[in-house]
């Protein structure tokens, strides 16, 4: 699997994508864990919210090797996709799913559920690798969208409401050559993305919640925005390393690292920018940003030094932050 590793020098820090073997994943897992109409879709998601609550149990383990965070059902809090399944934080309490302790990669929270790739946990009978999956009941059941037993997608973005999928395919499979692709019909068909303006492969991809043609990519050279379905990208923030990305309707939130971490926001209408205040996270890069769509000023961020994770939550747009994970240890009130 691909891990986010932070290479620290006296001058800079970089997020690098490197590989590890399946045996390493299994060892980590063992160590960490002793087409519908809109109305039909809404009904399905309402039902899945109840199912998810029944599928959760108290959790007091460690939260490391996180490969995505997000608010799929705000009433259940923020989800952390780890080597050993989903962990949830809300109101000072931690929970995890009662099964499906899968190693979720390329995790994207959407309204009422999530899209993911990765590898099955030891309690799962899913194929390895998972291919592309979606779930609207917290992972109790997962619908196959293709590539089972073939591909593990690590760099992937999915729109929160439109479910447009953009991904980097690193190795050819039965349908796709290596490259940048998108699907607007849940993986039934795929089209190549030209990505003019991106000189290097992205570390992260984010998709606008409702506009399937608006996406963002972060690379070692900066943060880039496309409004034509990935055909071309323009620079939003350059001459710095881009890391995490998150869209809401009128704003793109992003983080960078150049000697120190930073977080900003760009208005999609007039391209004005603002700086978001951060907690004191030292020389750690922000790997993931998640915003609660049901709460205007609530964010969660996850940072890492390459070995352990820290996470912080704000309910006032960065004026104050509460640490909820400290070096992989979940914190409670």
Image (cartoon, rainbow, N blue to C red):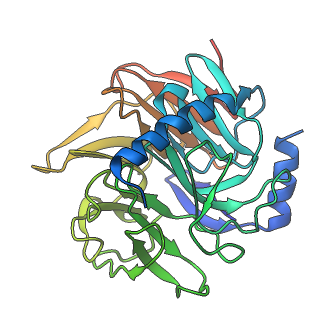
Q: Quadrant of residue 96?
A: top right
Q: Position of residue 127 (x, y in %)?
A: 76, 67
Q: Position of residue 14 (x, y in %)?
A: 52, 57
In the rendered image, the vertical position of residue 153 relative to residue 195, given as above or below: above
Q: In what quadrant of the picture does the C terminus appear?
A: top right
Q: In what quadrant of the picture does the N terminus appear?
A: bottom right
Compared across the picture, whether 18 is left or right of 102 comes to: left
Q: Residue at point 48% right, 71% down?
A: 187
Q: Position of residue 297 (x, y in %)?
A: 33, 26
- Please count the marks in the image: 0
Residue farthest toward the left in the current orientation of the protein: 270
Q: Is there any visible trace of residue 139 in the rendered image?
A: yes
Of 142 and 318, nearer the camera is 142
Compared across the picture, whether 202 is left or right of 126 comes to: left
In the rendered image, the vertical position of residue 128 relative to residue 7, given as above or below: below
Q: Residue at point 62% right, 75% down?
A: 147
Q: Residue at point 64% right, 55% down?
A: 142
Compared across the picture, whether 57 is left or right of 108 comes to: right
Compared across the picture, whether 88 is left or right of 37 comes to: right
Q: Residue at point 64% right, 46% down?
A: 66
Q: Is there any visible trace of residue 204 in the rendered image?
A: no
Of 70 and 144, nearer the camera is 144
């Amino acid at each position: 699997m691909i891990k986010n590793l932070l290479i620290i020098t006296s001058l800079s820090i970089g997020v690098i994508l490197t590989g590890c073997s399946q045996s390493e994943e299994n060892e980590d897992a063992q160590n960490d864990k002793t087409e519908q109409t809109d109305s039909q879709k809404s009904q399905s998601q309402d039902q899945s919210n109840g199912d998810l609550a029944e599928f959760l149990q108290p959790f007091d383990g460690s939260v490391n090797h996180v490969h995505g965070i997000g608010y799929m059902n705000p009433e259940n809090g923020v989800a952390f996709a780890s080597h050993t399944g989903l962990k949830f934080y809300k109101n000072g309490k931690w929970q995890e799913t009662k099964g499906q302790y899968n190693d979720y990669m390329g995790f994207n929270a959407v309204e009422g559920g999530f899209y993911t790739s990765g590898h099955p946990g030891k309690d799962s009978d899913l194929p390895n690798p998972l291919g592309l999956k979606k779930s609207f009941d917290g992972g109790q059941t997962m619908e196959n969208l293709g590539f089972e037993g073939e591909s593990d997608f690590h760099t992937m973005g999915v729109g929160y409401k439109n479910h447009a999928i953009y991904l980097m395919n690193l190795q050819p499979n039965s349908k796709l050559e290596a490259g940048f692709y998108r699907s607007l019909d849940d993986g039934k068909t795929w089209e190549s993305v030209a990505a003019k303006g991106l000189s290097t492969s992205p570390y992260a991809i984010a998709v606008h919640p409702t506009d399937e043609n608006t996406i963002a990519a972060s690379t070692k050279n900066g943060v880039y925005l496309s409004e034509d379905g990935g055909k071309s990208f323009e620079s939003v923030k350059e001459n710095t390393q881009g890391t995490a990305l998150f869209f809401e309707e009128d704003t793109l939130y992003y983080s960078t690292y150049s000697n120190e971490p930073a977080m900003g926001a760009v208005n999609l209408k007039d391209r004005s920018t603002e700086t978001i205040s951060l907690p004191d996270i030292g020389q750690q890069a922000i790997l993931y940003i998640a915003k609660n769509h049901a709460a205007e000023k609530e964010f969660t961020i996850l940072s890492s030094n390459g070995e352990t994770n820290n996470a912080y939550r704000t309910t006032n747009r960065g004026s104050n932050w509460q640490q909820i994970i400290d070096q992989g240890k979940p914190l409670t009130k």
